[in-house]
Amino acid sequence: MLADLDFNEKEALIYLHISPSEYEKEDYFNMNRVLAAKSPEERPVDPMSLVRSLGLGNGETKQGRR
């Protein structure tokens, strides 16, 4: 667990350019939420959006209606 805290602090120092004293003053849960944030490309896709993007919504197939 302590190794995880140290790793999170290292990530904040490198990527967020936060000084060690600033990191220590920050809210733990908020900082972890920020460090765990994913880019839009890495986020899960809504299954129905995926189906629609493949042209399979509303009973249709790529070849046309059933």
Image (spheres, rainbow, N blue to C red):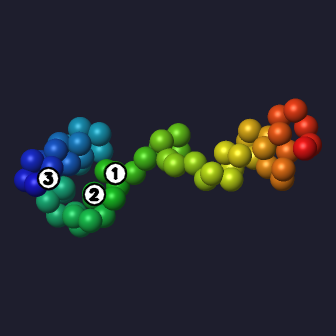
Using the rendered image of the protein, determine whether residue 37 is visible from the camera's viewpoint. yes
Give the answer, above or below, for where 9 lies relative to 30. above
Q: Residue 61: where, in percent of width, then height?
A: 83, 39
Upstream in sequence: badge 3 or badge 1? 3
Residue drawn 16% across and 44% down? 7
Q: Residue 40: where, in percent of width, then height?
A: 53, 45
Residue drawn 18% across and 56% down? 23
Upstream in sequence: badge 2 or badge 3? 3
Quadrant for residue 17, please give it: top left
Q: Secondary structure at mark 2?
A: helix
Using the rendered image of the protein, determine whether residue 21 is visible from the camera's viewpoint. no
Give residue 36's mark: 1
Q: Are marks 1 and 2 in contact (CB under 8 Å)?
A: yes
Residue drawn 17% across and 64% down? 25
| In the foreground, 34 or 63 | 63
Give residue 47's mark: none
Please give left or right for residue 31 compared with residue 6 in the image. right
Residue where numbered disc 3 is placed: 5
Give residue 32's mark: 2
Disc 3 to disc 1, how far (Cα)? 13 Å
